[in-house]
Image (cartoon, grey):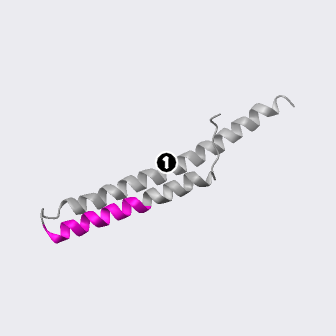
Amino acid sequence: MNSLRPSSEVAALHKEQKQLLQVLQVQHLFRDSFQVLLAQFVGVESGSRLEAAAHGSCVSIMRDACDVITRFEAAQDFVTTSP
């Protein structure tokens, strides 16, 4: 029975690695999407009303994303290996 413990730990680590890779992929998608969005707003001429609206939209999107992250962290609906 002692030899089964390492196998189950390895399986658990593989499962956790898969979940972490999925989270990392989502983070990369978010980062890439944000960079594209930011590039669109940077092209707007300085001093125009459109620039102010673009910056407002960008801030709103980032605020919403931070709210989602905060709610996720507050829910404690994830597994961690740290003590």
**Which image quadrant is residue 71 in?**
bottom right
Task: Kindly give the residue lying farthest to the right in the view shown.
Answer: 1
Residues packed near mark 1 inside 10 Å, few (<14), some (14 to 19) or many (20 plus): few
Is the N terminus in the top left, top right, bottom left or bottom right quadrant? Answer: top right
Residue range corresponding to the magenta coloring: 48-64
**Which image quadrant is residue 36 in?**
bottom left
In the rendered view, would you say 16 is above or below 70? above
- Residue in the picture at 42% in, 55% down: 29
Between 70 and 11, the one nearer to me in the picture: 70
x, y percentage for residue 12? 70, 41
Amino acid beneath label 1:
Leu
Is the C terminus in the top left, top right, bottom left or bottom right quadrant? Answer: top right
The residue where tag 1 is placed is 24
In the rendered view, would you say 12 is above or below 58? above
In the rendered view, would you say 20 is above or below 29? above
Q: Main secondary structure of the magenta part?
A: helix
